[in-house]
């Protein structure tokens, strides 16, 4: 008997959540958005690269207080500052049987919010999507790593036919940490200086700051795992060059006056450094600077 395909409940139908929902529905999975609204469905438009025709995606919506049974598959794609408020109304419907898939920037945002013995898979996407509900523009479809446990779920192989360059990894630390360092440098610097990503390479002062931030991050990650290769600056500059004209997600949040993901990105690094007894003054300064811009 083939396994039935999952019915995912999605928290966060922003850019990345919508992209994931589209790939999952293409593979035959059901996806319902959990949201406190009276709208019965969300109508989305996905703009594709290379002038391919737009995709119309209709996602059913369910209010968290309308749930009547435990959630078996939960996709968490809310921005990290909203993790706690999004998960709170679901607490009684999350069990050790719930498979949670976390698709968020940064690290640690779900710590203490999920059932102690539940199953957590992590996803790291290097795809780029911009826009605002209901129109999401897919700028580039790149690798997504999914994993965090020795074996993939039964539905994984079939999903790779519908989710471009989807790869399984037992240990997610390397792609997570690579992305974390990129986000820890590009996001707060571009947000604080209100510049596009490319300025990290072209503005000598920002490039110098990027170098110090990256060195601090590599030192923390190397203390956590002596096999961490370090030398992350090359990757940071490569991403800044490849996305030179883009507005980082933190810059966009700051421009909107919305909470940013600084705590889950540089804040995570500072917390690890404190536990390890390492000094990370530049990262600490950025956390404080970002926090005071919203105060
Ligand atoms: O992931 C990003 C973000 O903006 O959050 C980068 C890679 C910096 C691209 O803008």
Image (spheres, rainbow, N blue to C red):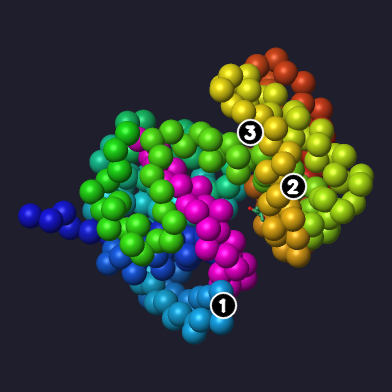
Q: Nearer the viewer, residue 114 or 156?
A: 156
Residue 209's spot in the image, x, y percent? 85, 39
Q: Nearer the viewer, mark 2 or mark 3?
A: 2
Q: CA distance from mark 2 to mark 1?
A: 25 Å
Residue 149's spot in the image, x, y percent? 35, 35
Image-based side of 233 in relation to 58, left or right: right
Dot 2 or dot 3: first in sequence order is: 2
Residue 66's spot in the image, x, y percent? 32, 62
Q: Are marks 1 and 3 in contact (CB under 8 Å)?
A: no
Dot 2 or dot 1: first in sequence order is: 1
Is 165 placed above or below 280 here?
below
Residue lying at the far bottom of the rendered structure:
53
Residue 118 seen from this side: no
Asked if residue 127 lies in the magenta stretch, the reply is yes
The residue to which callout 3 is attached is 268
Which secondary structure class fits the magenta region best?
Answer: strand
Q: Quadrant of the N terminus?
A: bottom left
The residue to which callout 1 is attached is 50
Q: CA distance from mark 1 to mark 3?
A: 37 Å
Q: Nearer the viewer, residue 279 or 118?
A: 279
Is 130 placed above or below 116 here?
below
Stretch in magenta: 120-149
């Amino acid at each position: 008997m083939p396994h039935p395909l999952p019915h995912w409940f999605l928290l966060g139908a922003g850019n990345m959540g919508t992209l994931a929902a589209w790939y999952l529905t293409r593979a035959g999975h059901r996806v319902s958005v959990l949201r406190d609204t009276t709208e019965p469905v969300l109508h989305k438009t996905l703009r594709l690269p290379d002038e391919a025709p737009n995709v119309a995606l209709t996602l059913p919506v369910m209010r968290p207080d309308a749930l009547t049974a435990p959630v078996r598959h939960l996709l968490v794609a809310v921005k990290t500052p909203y993790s706690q408020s999004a998960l709170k109304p679901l607490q009684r419907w999350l069990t050790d049987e719930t498979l949670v898939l976390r698709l968020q920037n940064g690290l640690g945002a779900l710590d203490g919010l999920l059932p102690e013995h539940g199953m957590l898979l992590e996803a790291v996407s290097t795809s780029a999507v911009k826009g605002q509900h209901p129109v999401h523009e897919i700028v580039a479809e790149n690798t997504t790593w999914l994993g965090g446990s020795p074996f993939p779920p039964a539905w994984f192989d079939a999903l790779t036919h519908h989710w471009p360059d989807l790869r399984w990894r037992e240990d997610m630390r390397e792609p997570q940490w690579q992305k974390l360092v990129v986000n820890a440098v590009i996001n707060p610097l571009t947000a604080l200086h209100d510049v596009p990503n490319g300025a990290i390479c072209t503005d000598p002062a920002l490039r110098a700051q990027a170098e110090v931030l990256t060195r601090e991050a590599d030192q923390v990650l190397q203390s956590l795992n002596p096999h961490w290769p370090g030398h992350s600056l090359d990757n940071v500059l490569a991403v800044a060059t490849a996305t030179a004209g883009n507005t980082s997600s933190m810059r966009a949040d700051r421009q909107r006056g919305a909470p940013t993901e600084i705590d889950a990105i540089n804040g995570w690094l500072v917390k690890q450094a404190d536990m390890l007894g390492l000094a990370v003054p530049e990262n600490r300064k950025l956390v404080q600077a970002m926090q005071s811009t919203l105060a």
